[in-house]
Image (tube, rainbow, N blue to C red):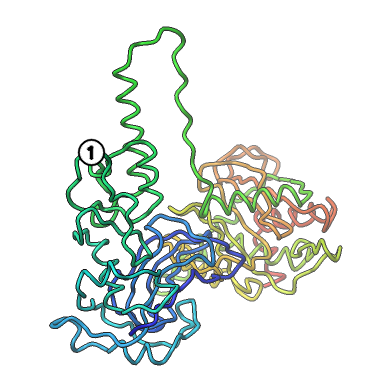
C-alpha cells in the first residue's frame, strides 16, 4: 500500500503570491525522486523550476500549462511507498523505494535541495480497471494503492477509454458521473474527451457546446479553456451571421481585455505604488557627450582585442552614477514610512532597465560602488544575457538602491522616469545624437544627450538633486572629472 501525499505550490520568496505553470516536467504515473524538479513556473520576477520534496509515483497534477496558481494551492500528489516498475522500463534506474522511505526533504527550490539525482521517468504497471471504480476517496484524503491511483489519472490523461460514459476529473481517483449520464432521447457519445479541468466542462455545458467538436491546443490535444472560449465565440458569430439583419447603427466591436498578470501585473502594481506613495519630482539637463564618446573610443582602442569586451556607454554612465552617489548619498536611500525615517544605504546596488520578451525587467549589479567601468560593463552584459534567456532569479532582480534607465536605445530623447519603489531616485538617459551646440564660443555639431533625474522629494530638496545631476553632466562633458574619484 502507498500513502498519497499532496505537494502544494511553495512560497517562492520575495513576496510572490502566485505563479503561472509554464511547463510540466513530469507526467502522471512517472516515478520521481526527492527534490526532482517537477514543474517549471513563471513568477512575476523569474522562471523557477520547482522540486518535489517527496519521492514516489505522481498520481495527479493540478493545473494546466498556462494556468495561474496561488501559493499554497495543490500542485500535484505523489504516492509514497513501494513501486514496481513496468517490465522493460527503468529496470536499471534508481528505485523509488529508497527515496520514498527516506521521507520528504522539505525543500522547495532548486539549488537548496539534498542534491539527489533526478530519477529516470518510469511508469507503474497498470492495475485492473475495476480498481478505479471501487475507489471512493481523493488521493489527499485516504491512502490508496500507488498503481491504482496512477492508472486512474494516467488513463484520463492519455485519453484511453476505461468504461462506457465514465470520465475522470484531474486530481481524483474516483469515477465522475456528472457528464456520463445520458439524457432522454440523446445519443450516447463514443470515446473519451481530452479534458482535465472540470471548469472547462462546466463552461461547455453552460453554452451547450459539444466538446467532441473542439480541437484542443494543449499538449497531446488537451482541450484548454481558451479552446472552449474560442469555440463559443465562433458559434455566437455564426448564429449572428445567420440571423435576420437588424437595421440601425452598427454595434461597436468588443474591446480586447488583457489580464494584468505575470511581469506586466507586477510592473503595474509597483509603478502604481511608486506614484501613490512617493512625492517625486524631475529635473533634467542637456549635456555635450562628445568627449565621453571620444574617451570610450580611446579606452577600447588602447585595450585591444585581447583585453576582453568593449567598454559600453552604459557602463561609463553607471560608473559616473556611483561616483555621484558617493558625493550625494541622500539619493542612495529609502524611506521607512512606519518609523518615519530616511535610511541611507551603505552600498550601491545599481539596477538597470532591460527590455526582454517577457517585458521590462531591472537586473541589479551588486556592490557597484566597488567596481570600475570594465567590471560594471561585464556584469551588465552577463545579466542582460541571462535576462534575454528568461533565467533571471528573484535575487538578481531585487535589492537595488538606485536605477539607471537608458531609454535612448528606443530612439527617445527625454522622459520623466518613475522611481523603482522603494528606491529614492532614477537617472534616465536619452539618445546621444548630433545637434547644434555652442562649443568654445562657436556654433558646432556635437554629440548631445538629455539626462533626467526623478527623485523622492522626501529624502532631499531640489538643490541636492540638481547638484547630483550637474555632477553627472560635468562627468559626461569632461570625463577627466572622474579621475579625482577613481
Which residue is pictured at 64% across the width and 37% down the height? 443
Q: Residues within 10 Å of mark 1 (few under 14, many from 20)?
A: few
Relative image position of residue 279 (x, y in whole percent): 79, 49
From the viewer's side, name the closer residue of 33 and 243.
243
Which residue is pictured at 85% across the width and 65% down the height? 341
Instruction: Name the quarter where the C terminus is drawn.
Output: bottom right
Rendering quarter of residue 48? bottom left
Relative image position of residue 283 (x, y in whole percent): 74, 46
Rendering quarter of residue 185? top left
Is 340 situated left or right of 331 in this image?
right
From the viewer's side, name the closer residue of 439 and 341.
341
Relative image position of residue 483 (x, y in whole percent): 68, 69
From the viewer's side, name the closer residue of 219 and 346.
219
Badge 1 element: loop
In the depicted structure, whether residue 34 falls above or below residue 251? below
Relative image position of residue 209 (x, y in whole percent): 31, 38
Which residue is pictured at 39% across the width and 72% down the height? 139
In the depicted structure, whether residue 31 falls above or below residue 321? below
Rendering quarter of residue 394? bottom right
Mark 1, residue position: 186
Is 384 situated left or right of 82 in this image?
right
From the viewer's side, name the closer residue of 107 and 455.
107
Quick one: which residue is furthest to the front in this view?
184
Q: How many labels does the image show?
A: 1
Amino acid at each position: 500500500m502507498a500513502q498519497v501525499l499532496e505537494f502544494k505550490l511553495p512560497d517562492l520568496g520575495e513576496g510572490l503570491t502566485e505563479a503561472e505553470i509554464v511547463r510540466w516536467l513530469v507526467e502522471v504515473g512517472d516515478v520521481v525522486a526527492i527534490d526532482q524538479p517537477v514543474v517549471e513556473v513563471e513568477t512575476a520576477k523569474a522562471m523557477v523550476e520547482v522540486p518535489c520534496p517527496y519521492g514516489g509515483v505522481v498520481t495527479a497534477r493540478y493545473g494546466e500549462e498556462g494556468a495561474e496558481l496561488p501559493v499554497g494551492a495543490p500542485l500535484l500528489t505523489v504516492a509514497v511507498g513501494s513501486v514496481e516498475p513496468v517490465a522493460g522500463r527503468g529496470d536499471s534506474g534508481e528505485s523509488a523505494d529508497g527515496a520514498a522511505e527516506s521521507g520528504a526533504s522539505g525543500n522547495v527550490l532548486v539549488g537548496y535541495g539534498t542534491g539527489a539525482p533526478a530519477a529516470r521517468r518510469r511508469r507503474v504497471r497498470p492495475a485492473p480497471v475495476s480498481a478505479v471504480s471501487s475507489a471512493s476517496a481523493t488521493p489527499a484524503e485516504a491512502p490508496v494503492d500507488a498503481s491504482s491511483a496512477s492508472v486512474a489519472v494516467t488513463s484520463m490523461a492519455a485519453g484511453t477509454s476505461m468504461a462506457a460514459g465514465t470520465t475522470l476529473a484531474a486530481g481524483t481517483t474516483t469515477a465522475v458521473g456528472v457528464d456520463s449520464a445520458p439524457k432522454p432521447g440523446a445519443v450516447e457519445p463514443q470515446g473519451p474527451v481530452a479534458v482535465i479541468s472540470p471548469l472547462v466542462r462546466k463552461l461547455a455545458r453552460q453554452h451547450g457546446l459539444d466538446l467532441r467538436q473542439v480541437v484542443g491546443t494543449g499538449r497531446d490535444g488537451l482541450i484548454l479553456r481558451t479552446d472552449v472560449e474560442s469555440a463559443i465565440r465562433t458559434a455566437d458569430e455564426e448564429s449572428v451571421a445567420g440571423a435576420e439583419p437588424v437595421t440601425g447603427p452598427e454595434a461597436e466591436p468588443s474591446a480586447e481585455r488583457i489580464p494584468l498578470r505575470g511581469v506586466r501585473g507586477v510592473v503595474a502594481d509597483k509603478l502604481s505604488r511608486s506614484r501613490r506613495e512617493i512625492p517625486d519630482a524631475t529635473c533634467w539637463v542637456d549635456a555635450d557627450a562628445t568627449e565621453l564618446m571620444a574617451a570610450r573610443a580611446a579606452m577600447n582602442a588602447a585595450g585591444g582585442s585581447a583585453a576582453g569586451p568593449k567598454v559600453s556607454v552604459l557602463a561609463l554612465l553607471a560608473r559616473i552614477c556611483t561616483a555621484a552617489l558617493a558625493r550625494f548619498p541622500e539619493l542612495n536611500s529609502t524611506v521607512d514610512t512606519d518609523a518615519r525615517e530616511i535610511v541611507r544605504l551603505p552600498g550601491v546596488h545599481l539596477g538597470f532597465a532591460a527590455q526582454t520578451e517577457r517585458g521590462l525587467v531591472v537586473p541589479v549589479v551588486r556592490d557597484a560602488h566597488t567596481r570600475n567601468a570594465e567590471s560594471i560593463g561585464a556584469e551588465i552584459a552577463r545579466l542582460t544575457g541571462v535576462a534575454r534567456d528568461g533565467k533571471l532569479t528573484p535575487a538578481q532582480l531585487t535589492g537595488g538602491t538606485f536605477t539607471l534607465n537608458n531609454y535612448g536605445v528606443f530612439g527617445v530623447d527625454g522622459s520623466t522616469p518613475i522611481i523603482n519603489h522603494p528606491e529614492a531616485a532614477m537617472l534616465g538617459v536619452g539618445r546621444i545624437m548630433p545637434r547644434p551646440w555652442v562649443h568654445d564660443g562657436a556654433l558646432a555639431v556635437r554629440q548631445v544627450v538629455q539626462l533626467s533625474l526623478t527623485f523622492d522629494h522626501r529624502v532631499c530638496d531640489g538643490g541636492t538633486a540638481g547638484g547630483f545631476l550637474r555632477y553627472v553632466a560635468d562627468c559626461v562633458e569632461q570625463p577627466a572629472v572622474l579621475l579625482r574619484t577613481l
